[in-house]
Image (cartoon, grey):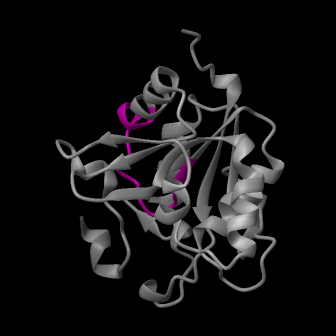
Amino acid sequence: MKNILQSEISSVILAGGQGIRMDGEDKGLIEFRGLPLVAHVASIIESKVDKIYISANRSFDSYASYGEVISDDLLGFQGPLAGISKALKVCSTKYLLVLPCDSPLIDSELIDDLISRMKQKDADICVAHDGSIMHATFALMKSNLGKSLEHFLNDGGRKMALWYRQQNLERIDVSDRLVVLTNLNKPEDLDF
């Protein structure tokens, strides 16, 4: 079975939200342990992927320090799938790694597990699962899914899990290390 090479993987860090629970601040640029949240994610994946995209709808210059900034094609804040759709359109590698900007405790093991399962099962999408639910913003997918996602979005779909379930899906159980899925949504979460 052929290994998946670093040169075959691009990544998109999803940073296009409105930051409503962070008092409107651009969440990916909020400092956590001395660095912007997005910097924690970028530092974990930079040795795992060929290219990093940052899906953002503002603060483009600030995000450009961490990767190539892309913006949704859909107007307004249409959710993470809009950012993934844009990333799939510009991605030139075989795979796209999807991660949120507000989960600075991800680790290399999670990325390696997604890549390994993708290689073993030849799935369309591999996604993190906590034993109860999937965490759709932690995923590795084939970049040829762009048309499928575009149709889903054009039909009004916005739920990541629903679109994922329409693909050949594999789940990675991380119930023994849930800390990697820690999502910092509110100012008080930053004291973690």
Q: Position of residue 160 (x, y in %)?
A: 52, 64
The relative height of residue 173 versus residue 164 in the rendered view (above or below) is above
Q: With 24 as the anchor, is 152 left or right in this view?
A: right
Residue under the image location 40 percent in, 54 percent down: 104
Q: Name the one closer to the observer, 47 or 166.
A: 166
Q: Which residues are magenta?
A: 98-111
Q: With 76 as the anchor, is 24 left or right in this view?
A: left
Residue under the image location 44 percent in, 84 percent down: 22
The relative height of residue 76 versus residue 16 in the rendered view (above or below) is below
Picture quadrant where residue 183 is located: bottom left
Q: Name the one closer to the observer, 118 or 98.
A: 118
Residue under the image location 59 percent in, 74 percent down: 158
Q: Name the one closer to the observer, 154 or 110.
A: 154
Q: Is residue 68 visible?
A: no
Residue under the image location 21 percent in, 51 percent down: 131
The relative height of residue 40 versus residue 59 in the rendered view (above or below) is above
Picture quadrant where residue 96 is located: top right
Residue 28 belongs to magenta span: no
Q: Position of residue 88 (x, y in %)?
A: 74, 50
Q: Quadrant of the N terminus?
A: top right
Q: Is residue 80 visible?
A: yes
Q: Position of residue 58 (x, y in %)?
A: 72, 76
